[in-house]
């Protein structure tokens, strides 16, 4: 996981308070044996994970600066931008720099008529059966035509636990983090969450 300065953080450190909380959760007298120690450790580990999920904020794990796409860009420009940046999606901003939507590979796939959940080989089959399948679709369209809107965003103080729940509940892969004016200051992706979760291992 990267901190706000871009440094890599180490593995989770179970604190004394986690251990004390775990011991309170275990009923009865504790005769410290390997089995008991393992039980204490496992419960303390759970407390540590919960503490991390509730203490780490978007500001601690988000990627910045954010790669954004202008709302007036056409689809070829957008696809080229995503390919050059080697990212699968990005926030779309209006002329004032505020988040207007989000675009991803899934939006392109949907426009191609192959659905949002497909394998690479399914795309190949679709294109072989539809000569030049991508070219007619991409021409003469702007990002407005395919972006997902309204965008789901959050402030920098949202917790990692809340972000994880959002990803699951709303079935999203990225969460733009915005300031009070609605302008992007960072982004949290599933990759960022994976790096954050490494702390709890």
Image: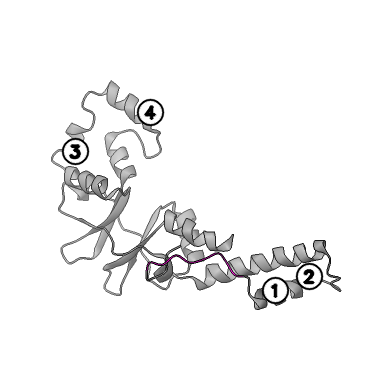
Q: Mark 2 points at which residue?
A: 26
Q: Mark 1 points at which residue?
A: 19
Q: Looking at this view, is 155 or 197 the one in front?
A: 197
Label 4 crowd bin: few (<14), some (14–19), many (20+), radius 10 Å: few
The image quarter in which residue 47 lies = bottom right
The image quarter in which residue 179 lies = bottom left
Q: Looking at this view, is 81 or 32 the one in front?
A: 32
Q: Mark 4 points at which residue?
A: 121
Precedes in sequence: disc 3 or disc 1: 1
Precedes in sequence: disc 2 or disc 3: 2
Give the mark toward the camera: 1 or 2. Answer: 1
Precedes in sequence: disc 1 or disc 4: 1
Label 2 crowd bin: few (<14), some (14–19), many (20+), radius 10 Å: few
Q: Quadrant of the C terminus?
A: bottom right
Q: Name the residue under label 3.
A: 138
Q: Position of residue 21 (x, y in %)?
A: 70, 75
Q: Is residue 131 positioned above or below 55 on the image?
A: above
The answer to the question of whether label 4 and label 2 lie on touching residues, with beta carbons closer than 8 A, is no
Would residue 148 be seen by someone viewing this image from the given angle? no
The residues bearing labels 1 and 4 have C-alpha atoms spaced at a distance of 50 Å
- Residue beneath the point at 20% across and 65% down: 97
């Amino acid at each position: 996981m990267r901190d706000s300065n871009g440094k890599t953080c180490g593995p989770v450190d179970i604190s004394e308070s986690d251990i004390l909380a775990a011991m309170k959760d275990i009923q009865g007298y504790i005769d410290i044996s390997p089995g008991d120690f393992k039980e204490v450790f496992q419960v303390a580990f759970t407390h540590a994970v919960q503490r991390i999920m509730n203490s780490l904020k978007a500001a601690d794990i988000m990627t910045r600066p954010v790669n954004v796409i202008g709302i007036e860009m056409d689809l070829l420009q957008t696809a080229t931008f995503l390919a050059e940046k080697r990212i699968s999606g990005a926030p779309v901003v209006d002329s004032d720099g505020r988040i207007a939507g989000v675009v991803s590979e899934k939006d392109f796939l949907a426009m191609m008529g192959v659905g949002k959940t497909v394998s690479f080989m399914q795309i190949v089959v679709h294109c072989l059966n539809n000569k030049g399948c991508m070219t007619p679709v991409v021409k003469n369209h702007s990002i407005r035509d395919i972006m997902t809107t309204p965008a789901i965003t959050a402030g920098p103080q949202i917790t990692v636990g809340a972000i994880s729940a959002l990803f699951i509940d709303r079935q999203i892969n990225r969460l733009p983090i915005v300031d009070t004016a609605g302008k992007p200051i960072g982004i949290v992706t599933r990759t960022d969450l994976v790096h954050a979760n490494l702390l709890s291992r």
